[in-house]
Image (cartoon, grey):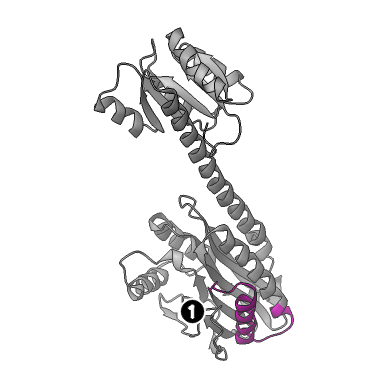
Amino acid sequence: MSEAVSRTATILVVDDHEPNRFAVGSVLRRAGHRVLEAASGPEALTVLHEADPLPDVAILDVRLPGVSGFELAQQVRNDPQLPHIPVIHISAEANDPGDRIRGLTAGAMAYLASPVAPEELLATVDRVLLSEREAKTVRDDRRFAFDLQHAFLPPPEKLAALEAVDLSVGYVPAMERAQLGGDFYAAFAVERGVLLAVGDVAGHSLAAATVMVELRHVLRAYALEGHQPHHILRLMDRLLVHFHPGVTATMCLVVLDVRSGAMDIANAGHLPPLVVSPDRQARYLHSHGPLLGLNLPHQPAVQARLEHGQVLLMVTDGLIERPRVDLAVSLEDLRRRAALAPCDPTALRDSLLQHYSRHTEDDIALLAVRRQSPEAGSSS
């Protein structure tokens, strides 16, 4: 057995010909593996449902009686009580290109011709085991990053408790990717009103997700100390440079005075926030600044105003950026769609996510906020 596979594996061998099962099983047992055997498809399913532990690999003869090895592999994949089990097909007869193509395109990890040399059998099993363990590591990292992001992104019902604003948020992970990114949103009360933020740590990895969590924590700390938005960006820039050299992030911060509608906007290389009006107008609030992590100065915040009835929309680039499409074109498309959507935070969020999330391979974070009317505030 190769050094790449260090532990004993449990392997299911399914073949209606007993001498073949004995030959394959003997090679695997001598290499230190635990072998389970079955002579047919139904027997194999029974063994799988009773096995503890479950097999790490299944070696299936293609020409099984009643149910072929191809059909058995499909039944195993479709069984909700069974986890993913990698399959190696083996056959003494069905070895023409069409058979091999059928087996491999259906999901088999390898296709062997019987009789197979012991060295080839063990090398194939080792490679399949190693590939599955590497894939499991990636899946575990993705799941951990996904859980980490959700654990530290405040739930909508908590954000809805903010006084004097109607707020809706959205987060859509791109779970089909090999790794996750560092998109996030934040909204919490500060002395001057409400601080709103969206950001994106560069990269798609567990590291990006953990840096995202760290930035959200320090954002709250700096904001509660009363720092101006652009000063917060400077402090976060210093943090990245000192503790995470080489890591960059984009972020847009808005401090909204919920009574007057006055806004202070600071932007570190992020998409500009968009103000959507009930009269189907929408305009970007441009505030420019360098990415975080570059140790460059950040200019004072830009002032603007959010009128009653208007919705402030803040998004990460995963919502609109597409390969080979100019960003200016994507921004204009977003502006037009937002202008035509209902001028309500929840309806606007749902409309945009329904349209854009189907066509992206990146994570999406979105935040939409509207000042409550004076009548709503006085009646609460």
* Nearer-the-camera pick, 328 or 206: 206
Q: Which residues are magenta?
A: 222-250
Q: Residues within 10 Å of mark 1 (few under 14, many from 20)?
A: some
Please check the rendered image and state whether residue 110 is part of the magenta-colored stretch, yes or no.
Answer: no
Callout 1: helix, strand or loop? loop
Q: Is residue 306 above or below residue 218?
A: below
| Residue at (34, 64) in percent of width and height | 323
Kindly tell me whether residue 69 is visible in this rendering: yes
SS assignment for the magenta stretch, majority: helix
Q: Amino acid at mark 1?
A: Gly
| Residue at (69, 66) in percent of width and height | 161
User: Can you identify the residue that label 1 sits on?
Assistant: 269
Please identify the quarter of the rendering in which residue 303 is found.
bottom right
Q: Is residue 88 above or below residue 280?
A: above
Kindly tell me whether residue 108 is visible in this rendering: no
Spot occupied by residue 5 in the image (x, y as percentages of width and height): 55, 36
Please identify the quarter of the rendering in which residue 239 is found.
bottom right
* Nearer-the-camera pick, 83 or 113: 113
The furthest residue to the bottom: 300
The furthest residue to the left: 97
Please check the rendered image and state whether residue 242 is part of the magenta-colored stretch, yes or no.
Answer: yes
Spot occupied by residue 172 in the image (x, y as percentages of width and height): 51, 57
Quadrant of the snapshot with the C terminus: bottom right
Spot occupied by residue 231 in the image (x, y as percentages of width and height): 63, 86
Q: Is residue 333 above or below residue 268?
A: above
Please state if 333 lies on the left or on the right of 130 as rendered: left
* Nearer-the-camera pick, 208 or 93: 93
